[in-house]
Amino acid sequence: MPLKDLLRRKELAPQSEKSRKARLEMEQPFELRVANGKIRNQKVLLVDDVYTTGRTLFHGAELLYKNGVEAVESLTFAR
């Protein structure tokens, strides 16, 4: 399975420095790194290091779906 960086974070402040409320209210922090034609109708696995509120995965999946991805699954290493 090919590994590709599909998303780039616009904001550099670490999530760990934010309160739970601030993380939940955060606007879309990602932008696509590839043309949406390259991901249209594809299945994507999002990988995240730590699951806290789930907002990172939600935002990533939302952007991918808006750009034509068929399905998004996630894998998180720690909770």
Image (spheres, rainbow, N blue to C red):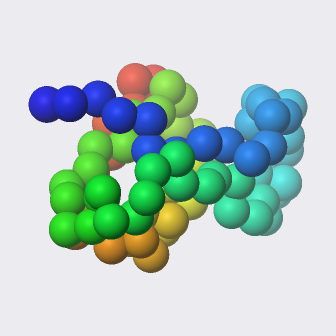
Total tally of numbered discs in the picture: 0
Q: Residue at point 40% right, 64% down? A: 36
Question: On the rendered structure, is 48 left or right of 16?
Answer: left
Do we see residue 79 in this rendering?
Answer: no
Q: Residue at point 84% right, 34% down? A: 13
Do we see residue 68 in this rendering?
Answer: yes
**Quarter occupied by the N terminus:** top left
Q: Residue at point 29% right, 29% down? A: 3
Query: Residue 5 lies in what quarter of the image?
Result: top left
> 21 or 37: nearer the eye?
37
30 shown above or below 46: below
Residue 76 image position (x, y, % from top left): 39, 32
Residue 39 image position (x, y, % from top left): 30, 58
> 44 or 21: nearer the eye?
44
Residue 54 image position (x, y, % from top left): 54, 51
Question: On the rendered structure, is 30 left or right of 4?
Answer: right
Residue 63 image position (x, y, % from top left): 50, 65
Q: Residue at point 33% right, 65% down? A: 37
Query: Residue 45 lies in what quarter of the image?
Result: top left
> 35 or 63: nearer the eye?
35
> 59 or 31: nearer the eye?
31
Question: On the rendered structure, is 56 left or right of 47?
Answer: right
